[in-house]
Protein backbone atom coordinates (compact mmCIF):
# COMPACT_ATOMS: atom_id res chain seq x y z
CA UNK A 1 0.00 0.00 0.00
CA UNK A 2 1.28 3.48 -0.87
CA UNK A 3 2.24 5.61 2.08
CA UNK A 4 2.94 9.33 2.36
CA UNK A 5 6.45 9.77 3.75
CA UNK A 6 7.03 13.53 3.51
CA UNK A 7 6.35 16.15 6.19
CA UNK A 8 2.72 16.02 7.34
CA UNK A 9 2.64 19.79 7.82
CA UNK A 10 3.01 20.23 4.06
CA UNK A 11 -0.42 18.67 3.62
CA UNK A 12 -2.02 21.24 5.93
CA UNK A 13 -0.25 24.09 4.13
CA UNK A 14 -1.34 22.74 0.75
CA UNK A 15 -4.98 22.66 1.81
CA UNK A 16 -4.73 25.96 3.67
CA UNK A 17 -6.31 24.57 6.84
CA UNK A 18 -5.29 22.65 9.94
CA UNK A 19 -5.89 18.94 9.41
CA UNK A 20 -4.56 18.08 12.90
CA UNK A 21 -2.11 15.48 11.62
CA UNK A 22 0.60 16.12 14.24
CA UNK A 23 -1.36 15.90 17.47
CA UNK A 24 -0.60 18.52 20.12
CA UNK A 25 1.85 20.31 17.82
CA UNK A 26 -1.13 21.58 15.81
CA UNK A 27 -2.40 23.54 18.81
CA UNK A 28 0.89 25.33 19.52
CA UNK A 29 3.02 28.05 17.99
CA UNK A 30 5.06 25.51 16.01
CA UNK A 31 2.06 24.69 13.79
CA UNK A 32 3.06 25.21 10.14
CA UNK A 33 -0.18 27.02 9.32
CA UNK A 34 0.56 29.59 12.03
CA UNK A 35 4.10 30.19 10.77
CA UNK A 36 3.75 29.79 6.99
CA UNK A 37 0.15 30.02 5.87
CA UNK A 38 0.77 29.45 2.17
CA UNK A 39 1.21 26.34 -0.02
CA UNK A 40 4.64 24.64 0.02
CA UNK A 41 7.03 24.93 -2.90
CA UNK A 42 8.72 27.74 -4.80
CA UNK A 43 5.39 28.95 -6.21
CA UNK A 44 3.55 28.85 -2.91
CA UNK A 45 3.12 32.62 -2.71
CA UNK A 46 1.44 32.80 -6.12
CA UNK A 47 -2.33 33.10 -5.81
CA UNK A 48 -3.85 31.38 -8.83
CA UNK A 49 -7.62 31.18 -9.17
CA UNK A 50 -8.83 27.59 -9.12
CA UNK A 51 -11.16 26.18 -11.75
CA UNK A 52 -14.40 24.45 -10.75
CA UNK A 53 -12.63 21.11 -11.01
CA UNK A 54 -9.72 22.44 -8.95
CA UNK A 55 -12.04 23.51 -6.13
CA UNK A 56 -13.71 20.09 -6.09
CA UNK A 57 -10.36 18.30 -6.16
CA UNK A 58 -8.96 20.34 -3.27
CA UNK A 59 -12.06 19.55 -1.19
CA UNK A 60 -11.64 15.83 -1.86
CA UNK A 61 -7.94 15.94 -1.06
CA UNK A 62 -8.60 17.84 2.16
CA UNK A 63 -11.10 15.23 3.33
CA UNK A 64 -8.92 12.29 2.26
CA UNK A 65 -5.80 13.65 3.94
CA UNK A 66 -7.65 14.58 7.10
CA UNK A 67 -8.57 10.92 7.64
CA UNK A 68 -5.23 9.62 6.35
CA UNK A 69 -6.59 7.51 3.48
CA UNK A 70 -5.12 6.48 0.15
CA UNK A 71 -6.98 7.23 -3.09
CA UNK A 72 -8.17 3.64 -3.37
CA UNK A 73 -9.43 3.55 0.22
CA UNK A 74 -11.30 6.82 -0.20
CA UNK A 75 -12.88 5.75 -3.48
CA UNK A 76 -14.02 2.49 -1.91
CA UNK A 77 -15.74 4.35 0.92
CA UNK A 78 -17.39 6.72 -1.56
CA UNK A 79 -18.77 3.79 -3.57
CA UNK A 80 -20.18 2.27 -0.37
CA UNK A 81 -21.72 5.65 0.51
CA UNK A 82 -23.61 5.78 -2.79
CA UNK A 83 -25.44 2.57 -1.85
CA UNK A 84 -26.87 4.02 1.38
CA UNK A 85 -30.26 5.72 1.45
CA UNK A 86 -30.32 9.49 1.73
CA UNK A 87 -27.67 11.99 0.65
CA UNK A 88 -24.40 10.45 -0.51
CA UNK A 89 -22.36 13.25 1.09
CA UNK A 90 -23.89 12.69 4.51
CA UNK A 91 -23.32 8.93 4.27
CA UNK A 92 -19.70 9.53 3.23
CA UNK A 93 -18.95 11.73 6.24
CA UNK A 94 -20.71 9.32 8.60
CA UNK A 95 -18.67 6.36 7.36
CA UNK A 96 -15.41 8.29 7.66
CA UNK A 97 -16.23 9.26 11.23
CA UNK A 98 -17.20 5.68 12.13
CA UNK A 99 -13.84 4.22 11.13
CA UNK A 100 -12.28 2.63 14.20
CA UNK A 101 -9.04 4.60 13.93
CA UNK A 102 -11.00 7.87 13.84
CA UNK A 103 -13.13 6.79 16.82
CA UNK A 104 -10.00 6.00 18.86
CA UNK A 105 -8.66 9.45 17.96
CA UNK A 106 -11.96 11.19 18.75
CA UNK A 107 -12.05 9.54 22.19
CA UNK A 108 -8.58 10.90 22.95
CA UNK A 109 -6.80 7.55 23.18
CA UNK A 110 -4.28 8.96 20.66
CA UNK A 111 -3.25 12.51 19.83
CA UNK A 112 -3.53 12.00 16.06
CA UNK A 113 -5.32 9.73 13.63
CA UNK A 114 -2.03 8.15 12.59
CA UNK A 115 -1.31 7.35 16.23
CA UNK A 116 -4.79 5.92 16.62
CA UNK A 117 -4.28 3.76 13.54
CA UNK A 118 -1.10 2.40 15.06
CA UNK A 119 -2.95 1.43 18.25
CA UNK A 120 -5.57 -0.41 16.20
CA UNK A 121 -3.07 -2.15 13.92
CA UNK A 122 -1.06 -3.36 16.91
CA UNK A 123 -4.15 -4.99 18.42
CA UNK A 124 -4.47 -2.59 21.37
CA UNK A 125 -8.17 -1.81 20.79
CA UNK A 126 -11.19 -3.95 21.63
CA UNK A 127 -14.78 -3.65 20.41
CA UNK A 128 -17.42 -5.39 22.52
CA UNK A 129 -14.66 -7.26 24.34
CA UNK A 130 -12.98 -8.63 21.21
CA UNK A 131 -9.71 -7.45 19.68
CA UNK A 132 -10.14 -5.58 16.41
CA UNK A 133 -6.97 -4.73 14.49
CA UNK A 134 -8.59 -3.37 11.32
CA UNK A 135 -8.46 0.43 11.16
CA UNK A 136 -11.27 0.61 8.58
CA UNK A 137 -13.70 -1.28 10.85
CA UNK A 138 -16.96 0.70 11.05
CA UNK A 139 -18.46 0.98 14.52
CA UNK A 140 -22.22 0.69 15.04
CA UNK A 141 -24.68 2.04 17.57
CA UNK A 142 -24.22 0.23 20.88
CA UNK A 143 -20.61 -0.86 20.31
CA UNK A 144 -18.32 -0.56 23.33
CA UNK A 145 -14.76 0.53 22.55
CA UNK A 146 -11.87 0.25 24.99
CA UNK A 147 -8.14 -0.28 25.13
CA UNK A 148 -6.41 -3.32 26.52
CA UNK A 149 -5.60 -2.99 30.22
CA UNK A 150 -1.83 -2.69 29.71
CA UNK A 151 -2.33 0.05 27.10
CA UNK A 152 -4.59 2.13 29.37
CA UNK A 153 -1.63 2.96 31.61
CA UNK A 154 0.59 4.11 28.73
CA UNK A 155 1.97 7.61 29.37
CA UNK A 156 1.17 8.86 25.87
CA UNK A 157 -2.38 7.52 26.04
CA UNK A 158 -2.96 9.15 29.43
CA UNK A 159 -1.59 12.48 28.21
CA UNK A 160 -3.68 12.41 25.05
CA UNK A 161 -6.83 11.48 26.96
CA UNK A 162 -6.31 14.36 29.39
CA UNK A 163 -6.03 16.84 26.53
CA UNK A 164 -9.05 15.48 24.69
CA UNK A 165 -11.40 15.50 27.69
CA UNK A 166 -10.67 19.22 28.14
CA UNK A 167 -11.74 19.89 24.54
CA UNK A 168 -14.76 17.61 24.72
CA UNK A 169 -15.84 14.29 23.22
CA UNK A 170 -18.15 14.16 20.16
CA UNK A 171 -21.80 13.98 21.19
CA UNK A 172 -22.35 10.66 19.40
CA UNK A 173 -19.83 8.98 21.70
CA UNK A 174 -20.03 8.48 25.46
CA UNK A 175 -16.79 8.02 27.40
CA UNK A 176 -16.22 6.87 30.98
CA UNK A 177 -12.81 8.41 31.79
CA UNK A 178 -12.32 6.28 34.90
CA UNK A 179 -12.62 2.96 33.06
CA UNK A 180 -11.62 4.33 29.62
CA UNK A 181 -14.62 2.62 28.06
CA UNK A 182 -16.72 4.32 25.41
CA UNK A 183 -20.10 3.57 23.89
CA UNK A 184 -21.42 4.57 20.48
CA UNK A 185 -24.68 6.32 21.38
CA UNK A 186 -25.79 7.14 17.83
CA UNK A 187 -24.42 7.41 14.32
CA UNK A 188 -22.44 10.59 13.57
CA UNK A 189 -23.81 13.38 11.40
CA UNK A 190 -22.23 16.25 9.49
CA UNK A 191 -22.70 18.58 12.47
CA UNK A 192 -20.33 16.34 14.46
CA UNK A 193 -17.38 17.25 12.21
CA UNK A 194 -15.63 20.35 13.50
CA UNK A 195 -13.63 21.12 10.34
CA UNK A 196 -15.36 23.03 7.51
CA UNK A 197 -16.12 20.42 4.87
CA UNK A 198 -18.17 20.83 1.68
CA UNK A 199 -18.92 17.19 0.98
CA UNK A 200 -21.22 18.04 -1.93
CA UNK A 201 -18.19 19.17 -3.92
CA UNK A 202 -16.68 15.70 -3.46
CA UNK A 203 -19.90 14.09 -4.68
CA UNK A 204 -19.90 16.36 -7.74
CA UNK A 205 -16.27 15.47 -8.46
CA UNK A 206 -16.94 11.72 -8.50
CA UNK A 207 -20.19 12.19 -10.45
CA UNK A 208 -18.38 13.48 -13.54
Image (spheres, rainbow, N blue to C red):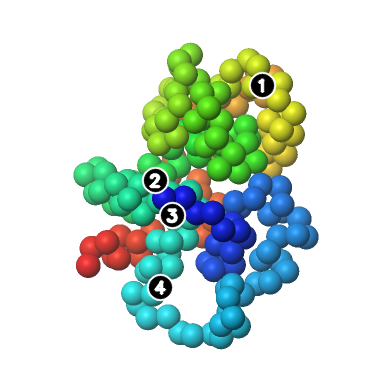
Tell whether 145 sits left or right of 20.
left
Number of on-image labels: 4
* Alpha carbons under labels 3 and 4: distance apart: 14 Å
Quarter occupied by residue 179:
top right
Looking at the image, tell me whether mark 3 or mark 2 is earlier in sequence order. Answer: 2
Answer yes or no: do the residues labelled 1 and 3 have beta carbons within 8 Å?
no
**What residue does disc 4 label?**
55
Q: Residue at x 36, y 54 (%)?
A: 71
Of residues 115 and 176, the one nearer the viewer is 115
Q: Secondary structure at mark 3?
A: helix
- In the displayed image of the protein, which residue is found farthest to the right? 29
Of tags 2 and 4, the one toward the viewer is 2
- Tag 3 near tag 2, CB within 8 Å: no
* Mark 1 surroundings within 10 Å by alpha-carbon count, few (fewer than 14), some (14 through 19), many (20 or more): some
Decide which of tag 2 and tag 4 comes sooner along the chain.
Answer: 2
Residue wearing tag 1: 152
Name the spot of residue 173 as percent of width and height, x first.
53, 32
Find residue 137 and name its label: none
Query: Would you identify the image quadrant in which residue 174 lies?
Result: top right
Taking the image as shown, residue 18 lies to the left or right of residue 185, namely right
How far across and how far down the image is residue 108, in percent?
Answer: 63, 35
The numbered mark, 4 or 1, whose residue comes first in the sequence reads 4
Look at mark 2 in the image and give the residue it sits on.
1
Amino acid sequence: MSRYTEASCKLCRREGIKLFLKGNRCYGEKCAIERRNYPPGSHGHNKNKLTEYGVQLREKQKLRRMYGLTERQFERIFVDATIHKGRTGDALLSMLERRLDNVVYSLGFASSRSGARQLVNHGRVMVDGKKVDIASFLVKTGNVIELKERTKTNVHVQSSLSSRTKMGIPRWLELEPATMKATVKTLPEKTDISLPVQEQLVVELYSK
